[in-house]
Image: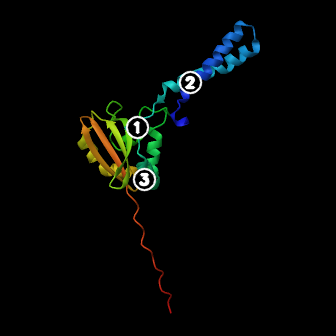
Amino acid sequence: MFRKTSLSIFLLGVGGVLTVVGFVAYFQDNATLNLAGFFYGIPVLLGGLALKAAELEPVPYGCETPPAVVKLREQQATSTQNQIRSDVTRYRYGQEAHLEDALERLGLSPSDGERPELVSVREIEVEGRYALVLVFDSPLISLSDWQEKQPKIERFFGPHVEAAIAEPSEHQIELTLMAVPESPQPATTPDPAPN
């Protein structure tokens, strides 16, 4: 619930109410409420304004996740896939774009103006595997540039992640991060005891 709630809106509401109470109390000569309203209301209101200026809204889901895919997520999703999904679908503060650091480290964000923008996310099943699809608006970074970085993307978001990159429409890149189930380790037999 709190992930979908804007902290800045909450603080603006509380700060606004306290400030109005302070003004009303001032004109009614109620020193206690006046002091409390101004002392708490104005800083909370300013804090809400500051957070609003630094707020990054959640990325919307492209479509509703089917229950079968939710079950697959619970069984197969890597911690990295879960972290990405959690981070991009909640309010963030102090960042200019979702996955800003990741894109820079991958060499897909030469400058702020060229940085691809994450516009939606969805969860799907690919050949029985859980997959997280990140849809980017990428007018200045071409499909070939993305494909060139595919091995680096897999290492960055791994382990146990396979990446697929597609361009379903012009300037739109779909980065699909598929879970790769761990192969069972062969059972080891103890060495026979020496005679």
Q: Looking at numbered disc 2 in the image, what kind of residue is underneath it?
A: Gly
x%, y% of residue 101? 41, 40
Looking at the rendered structure, the secondary structure element under dot 2 is: helix
Q: Nearer the viewer, residue 178 or 66?
A: 66
Find residue 114 and report its image quarter. Answer: top left
Q: Nearer the viewer, residue 164 or 154?
A: 164
Mark 1 to mark 3: distance in Å? 17 Å
Q: Nearer the viewer, residue 144 or 21?
A: 21
Q: Is residue 161 above or below residue 188?
A: above
Q: Is residue 161 above or below residue 146?
A: below
Q: Which residue is mark 3?
A: 72
Q: Which residue is mark 1?
A: 61
Mark 2 to mark 3: distance in Å? 39 Å
Q: Residues within 10 Å of mark 2 (few under 14, many from 20)?
A: many
Looking at the image, the residue that sits furthest to the bottom is 195
Q: Which mark is residue 48?
A: 2
Mark 1 to mark 2: distance in Å? 27 Å
x%, y% of residue 54? 49, 27
Q: Is residue 109 visible?
A: no
Q: Looking at numbered disc 1 in the image, what kind of residue is underneath it?
A: Tyr
Q: Nearer the viewer, residue 120 or 66?
A: 66
x%, y% of residue 121? 38, 40
Task: Please report whichever mark, 1 or 3, sits nearer to the chain's N-terminal start.
Answer: 1
- The residue that appears at 39% across and 65% down in the rendered structure is 183
- Front of the two marks 2 and 3: 3
Q: Is residue 64 left or right of residue 171?
A: right
Q: Is residue 22 above or below residue 61?
A: above
- The residue that appears at 39% across and 56% down in the rendered structure is 160
Looking at the rendered structure, the secondary structure element under dot 1 is: loop
